Amino acid sequence: MTIIVDQPQFENDGEEQKPNNGEESGLVLDGGFCIPNTNSFGHNFRDYKIESERQKGVENFYRTNHINQTVDFVKRMREEYGKLDKVEMSIWECCELLNQVVDESDPDLDEPQIEHLLQTAEAIRKDYPNQDWLHLTALIHDLGKVLLHPSFGELPQWAVVGDTFPVGCAFDKSIVHSKYFMENPDYNNSNYNTKCGIYLERCGLDNVMMSWGHDDYMYLVAKENGTSLPSAGLFIIRYHSFYALHRSEAYKHLMNEEDVENLKWLQIFNKYDLYSKSKVRVDVENVKPYYQSLIDKYFPAKLRW
Ligand SMILES: [Fe+2]
Ligand SMILES: [Fe+2]
């Protein structure tokens, strides 16, 4: 594979962006969704010291995220990563590369990433055997986390994982730790802080810039490489961490009819994404031929990343 990457510069690259303690990691599930009292590490959450450390870690993570995810930042990232000039590799090669990165928000740090992908995909396949596009969507939904890998610029955790939200319009109160948006430069920008901001009502989420992370990156990669996945698959990939929409129904005024339809699939997908963790082990070699056949069907050529 070809690897050429410039290390992007970050304005606020403080220590809190790269927490490395287990307590921090225990809190935020894949999309950044917090489940209070979930004992992901086998910790006893009645231990108030551990619990409050955990809370502090998550809060720091979101503070940094909310301060730095601006319209300018998202534009820069989309432009830089939209070039797709970093690496050339297949979907399966990317699954294997992802095993080398550590998502610090993942409660199952011992579990290789490929297991989470396959567990999610296999669980959905069992319940929706005829939706092969959904199986493949599940397999690839988190591949954008390779942004944490040195070959992709080793972005800080706050620019890769966690809940996502639109930029360019008012930040909704339902977004986790939303008080920190007051420190975001866009917060007081009158172009960006109204209900619709730079967008038109019902313009379609496709036209809305989302905070930068693994979701938007994988969406760009799939789309620009000309995948034949249906729009519901691309929708799941781009918005699976957009909890303000799928938990709190915020930003619905920006959705068009197709988004409303696709959201139904995302709601289904999300149940599997969150709860497939720490379940049965998947025999990777055993299921690989099936997923390879889906890759060949929906991504016939090697991908540019
Ligand atoms: Fe996931
Ligand atoms: Fe994810």
Image (cartoon, rainbow, N blue to C red):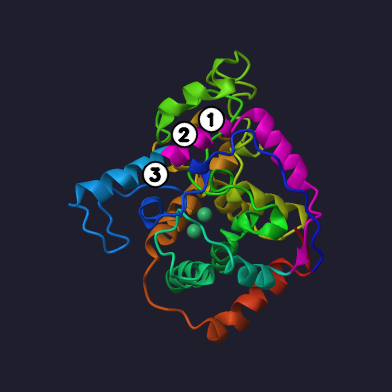
At label 3, the amino acid type is: Gly
In this orientation, does residue 110 appear?
A: yes
The structure residue drawn at horizontal position 41% and vertical position 26%, both measured from the top left corner, is 179
| Disc 2 target residue | 63
Residue sitting nearer the eye, 179 or 282: 179
Label 1 Cα neighbours within 10 Å, binned few <14 / some 14-19 / many ≥20: some
Which sits earlier in the primary sequence, circle 2 or circle 3? Answer: 3
Q: Give how far apart the Cα atoms at labels 2 and 3 are.
A: 10 Å
Residue sitting nearer the eye, 98 or 127: 98
Q: Which residues are magenta?
A: 60-89
Instruction: Name the image quarter holding the C terminus.
Output: bottom right
At label 2, the amino acid type is: Arg
Marks 1 and 2 close (CB-CB < 8 Å): yes
SS label for mark 1: helix
At label 1, the amino acid type is: Ile
Which sits earlier in the primary sequence, circle 3 or circle 1? Answer: 3
Label 3 Cα neighbours within 10 Å, binned few <14 / some 14-19 / many ≥20: many
Q: Give how far apart the Cα atoms at labels 3 and 1 are.
A: 16 Å
> Is 29 colored magenta in this rendering?
no
The structure residue drawn at horizontal position 40% and vertical position 32%, both measured from the top left corner, is 174
In the rendered image, residue 168, in percent from the top left (x then y), is placed at: 61, 26
